Image (tube, helix red, strand yellow):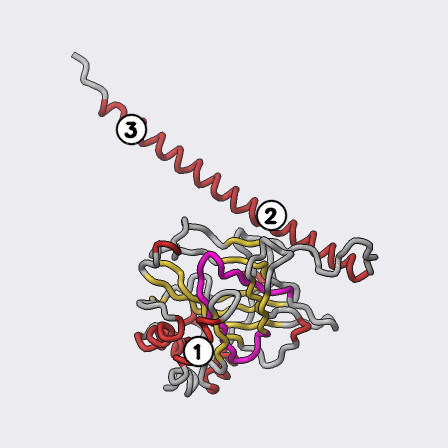
Amino acid sequence: MQILANDLIDKADFYRGKFDSAKPFRHVLITPFFDSAIAEAMLQEFPVPLESQMQGEVGEKCRKFACHDVRSIGPTYRLVDDYVSSPEFARVMERVTGTQNLLYDPGYNGGGTHDNLSGQGMLAHVDFNLHPTTGGHRRCNAIIYLNKEWNEQWGGNLELHSDPWDFENDQIVSYPPLFNHCILFETNQHSWHGFQTVQAPDGRELSRKSFTIYMYTKDRPAEEIAPKHWTKYVLPGPPKHFQAGYTLSAEDVQELKLAFKERNVFLQVMYGRESKLLTRAETLTKAIEHLQKMQKPALEPARK
């Protein structure tokens, strides 16, 4: 059964050229990505969000529902997973990205289906760099959107950043999450990306649906290797129109309040990470101390 769009493989070299020349880092928009019948079936089978499972990295409440068990979703997702795990798909991704020996992740760590509802956004970030189980180097992300209707004013547009730390000079390229559009991009220490909060002006509930594939290699060029890290987030700078002498409007005040709320959530997540690490370090320290006590009698010389 045809999984990818008819002309994607034929246009792989064309997409490679676009990928290599793109700014602020290597990426390409591929449209359409899946065969139309497959994309339609994926939308029909897309998982219904479960509020009880909408949790962030350290258990905080959020409005994002993710399903990493792709094969459990439905028959179309099993077909897609069969193809994504095939050598043919790896070769297509290798042709477009120029990265050889790409590996599939059967556990879809961080990937699979993502459903971001109204009120949810994602700060600019670079992804974790090493697979948590295999230690493989994360090399590229393919995000395929499944939204039949989207207005750029609703937020949720994928934003690629040159450097969010330098917010005054940060350059941003934006893509709306349109149906069967795929953004394929390299993942390294400079592939900053995120999206603004999803919110309809009329207050209705929105759902930003996507299917995400991450691919890895066993190694990567030495100059690209960084110490192991989790996802790194950066808070945004002030709005561009906030200048000396500017008078805040009611909308500006609401924007500031939202920014402070997001900052507090961010700090809670970071402190949650810190707490987990401290707890783990304490557990390991006690385990080492226990082993040392157990070994000490065996090391002492026998008394005469």
User: Circle 1: is it few (<14), some (14-19), or many (20+) Cα within 10 Å?
Assistant: many
The span shown in magenta is 176-197
Considering depth in this image, is 113 or 143 the residue closer to the camera? 143
Mark 2 lies on residue: 268
Q: Position of residue 129 (x, y in %)?
A: 42, 56
Q: Name the residue under label 1.
A: 15
Secondary structure beneath disc 2?
helix
Left or right for 162, reference 189: right
Amino acid under label 3? Met
User: Which quarter of the picture shows residue 286?
Assistant: top left
Which residue type carries mark 2? Gln
In the image, which is nearer the foreground, mark 3 or mark 1?
A: 1
Q: In which quarter of the image is the N terminus?
A: bottom left
Tag 2 or tag 3, which sits nearer the N-term?
2
Q: Which of marks 2 and 1 is in front?
A: 1
Do the residues bearing badges 2 and 1 touch, measured as CB atoms within 8 Å?
Answer: no
Query: For residue 77, which numbered disc appears in the image?
Result: none
Query: Going 47% across and 42% down the picture, which residue do you hit?
Result: 277
Of pointers 2 and 1, the one earlier in the residue sequence? 1
Residue plotted at (39% across, 79% down): 13
Q: Does the magenta stretch include residue 69?
A: no
Q: In this view, does 117 lie to the left or right of 46?
A: right
Q: What element carries label 3?
A: helix
Q: In the image, residue 12 lies at what x, y percent?
A: 40, 80
Please report contact status of discs 3 and 1: CB closer than 8 Å, yes or no. Answer: no
Of residues 118 and 225, which is closer to you in this image?
225
Q: How crowded is mark 3: few (under 14 residues within 10 Å), some or many (20 or more)?
A: few
Task: Kindly report the distance in space between the C-alpha atoms of the residues bearing marks 3 and 1.
Answer: 61 Å
Separation of residues labelled 2 and 1 (CA atoms): 41 Å
User: Which residue does the numbered mark 3 point to in the structure image?
Assistant: 294
Where residue 68 appears, as percent x and y from the top left, is 45, 65
